[in-house]
Image (cartoon, coloured by chain):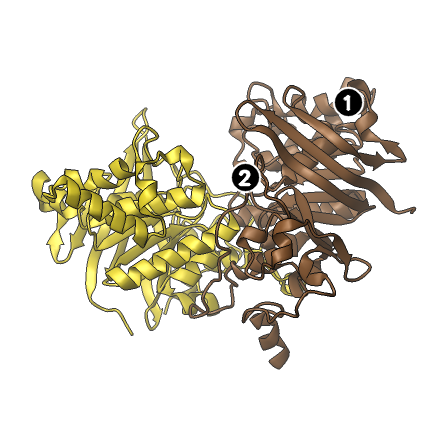
Chain colours: A brown, B yellow
Amino acid sequence: MEDTILKVENLHVSFKSHDDGEIKAVRGVSFELKKGETLAIVGESGSGKSVTAKSLMGLLPKQNSFVKQGKIMYEKKDLLKYSNKEMQKIRGSEISMIFQDPMTSLNPTMKIGKQIIEGFRRHQIVGKKEVYKKATELLELVGIANPEERIKDYPHQFSGGMRQRVVIAMALASNPNILLADEPTTALDVTIQAQILDLMKDLQKKTGAAIVIITHDLGVVANMAQRVAVMYAGEIIETGTVDEIFYEARHPYTKGLLLSMPKLHSSRSTKLIPISGTPPDLSQLPEGCPFAARCPYVMKVCHDFTPDSTKVSDTHMVSCWLEDKRAPRIEWRSGEGVSKDEENRKAN
Amino acid sequence: MKKTEKLIEVKNLKKYFHVGKGKLLKAVDDITIDIYKGETLGLVGESGCGKSTAGRTIIQLYKATSGQVIYDGEDIQKKSSTEIKSMKKKMQMIFQDPYSSLNPRMTVLEIISEGIDNHEFHYNKKEKEEKVYELLELVGLNKRHATRYPHEFSGGQRQRIGIARALAVEPEFIIADEPIAALDVSIQAQIVNLLQELQEKKRLTFLFIAHDLSMVKYISDRIAVMYLGIIVELSDSEDLYDEPFHPYTKALLSAIPVPDPKIERIRERIILEGDVPNPMDPPSGCRFRTRCPSAMDICTESVPKWQEVSSNHFVACHLYNV
């Protein structure tokens, strides 16, 4: 396929731990990323979404983590086979990453301009003057007022939103093909979040970079993504276009997530339906489907065997035993499936 | 059912912090608000707007710089310290971070019963244990959990322990300061539902402080919006969402991404320019004017009056001057 830029196949990542043995953080994750699209990876803490992103960048801690199997195909080559040196060439130039906390992803003792330059001096050999000019342009591009002055400032002189802009400027300095954004707006206020999301979409239009956005906020997903992968306990349990996930979700966990969030337009009388229980311990995973213990539609088979992924449409895959032909047809709890808001909108 | 009996009256409450070099940080700068018995009042705003400071000053964790907090007709500040202690029993707090708000060296039993000991309930050991077990059941945990330590629990469970601790001294009024912000989405709904159940069972009054407007709307009867130390708008929660008056509230509401891609595609956002100004040196006149899309000359010159624009809907903005 021409337009696929990154393909992850059956990725398994584990961590070693002193008392718990092996923690299987990512278990058989596969997905594709197409040129210029935005893919959202959604999941709760500990679902393996950040570990997936870090393994794409080769940023997993060497001492206690290891990729057990799998491939990460980028431009017909497997990134997992790359040496550290080769990875360094790709990191920050072809694949960039922005992190959650803009306070800790900048060096507090170094001026902003120097930090931006550090990034592209490594990858492109250009003169100092030119480089500073480019840094100023970048700051302007991400909407920082009077960049000639600000380039001489230290990170603490910027607000949280501004710092995240700087981080984005750095990530985009070398026109990457892929931008990995790990919870880029979680630490920011809503009005600032709106600015940053807008900025990312804007820059994507200009540069054509593909974005992988990792988040737990379904609102951000609805705003940013074309496709969504839902992760639970280290697996992708459902993937589809943003409409398929929000309006035709098949997995009880995906449905549960959507139901447990209040809608802005829903009234107080509609009760939230929480997902009971907590995610499983990744060092002592149960047999079968990892969601079985919390699933309201659990069947006997779910405790014994892991479900295969079933194709619902060309773009929509789900791993759940309910999709099996032999499974009983279930009545979704009220409000599940088609959302009430959706019905109301259609009625109006 | 309209709740109209006042439990707490906050009058011209101010809390200033000295930050060295003679500078003052006016974290809460003159807020006046009533909290009715049995209601949930939502207090929303961005980080640094003073919402947590407001909550902590109301509950007397901070000493107010000036202004009054009247609890059930009695002015708290005029009380002696022993009287304040007995009043504090009626007011409890639930904190944001379930990891740092529980002492890691204490068992759940000790954590929950600490308040009981402090406020001299005169239970014997057996009664105290019974009480703790009852509280644990109430918040969806069980007896067996009483001997464990906080690190043995997940975030959601810890928040339940925090709630049990707050309920131990049989309070009437609870301030929940971002109680769900640190929890996962699927757990947030569990805690919110629990808080609502408890409110019904125990006839509690809540002040719910948060930045997540969709959750606040869901749980609150009325909502107050804060910006840079002052309240800019107050109304019934439905009204606030259906018809926000203040430009800041409008922007705040439009900025929340809705978990619905079809709405997101067509929604028009009001993107605010810039950041919240430095609270050490707030703008003259209306504090929001530097970011306001509809700022006028008058906004620089005078502070907008707090006025009732429609029934029970208050706003401080020059756009609504009569």
Q: Position of residue A48 (x, y in %)?
A: 63, 39
Mark 2 surroundings within 10 Å by alpha-carbon count, few (fewer than 14), some (14 through 19), many (20 or more): some
Q: Are marks 1 and 2 in contact (CB under 8 Å)?
A: no
* Relative horizontal placement of residue A206, taking residue B311 as reference (left or right): right
Give the labeled residue for mark 2. Answer: A281
Judging depth in this view, the residue of B287 and A319 nearest the camera is A319
Q: Position of residue B113 (x, y in %)?
A: 22, 40
Mark 1 surroundings within 10 Å by alpha-carbon count, few (fewer than 14), some (14 through 19), many (20 or more): some
Say which chain tag 1 marks.
A
- For image coordinates 54% across by 60% down, the residue present is A296
Give the labeled residue for mark 1. Answer: A88
User: Is residue B28 visible from the viewing direction of this image?
Assistant: no
Judging depth in this view, the residue of B39 and A43 nearest the camera is A43
- The quadrant in which the N terminus of chain B is found is bottom left
Q: Position of residue A241 (x, y in %)?
A: 74, 58
Q: Amino acid at mark 1?
A: Gln
Q: Amino acid at mark 2?
A: Asp
- For image coordinates 40% across by 39% down, the residue present is B97
* Relative horizontal placement of residue A201, taking residue A81 as reference (left or right): left
Say which chain tag 2 marks.
A
- For image coordinates 75% across by 45% down, the residue present is A204
Distance CA(mark 1)–CA(mark 2): 34 Å
What secondary structure is marked by label 2?
Answer: loop
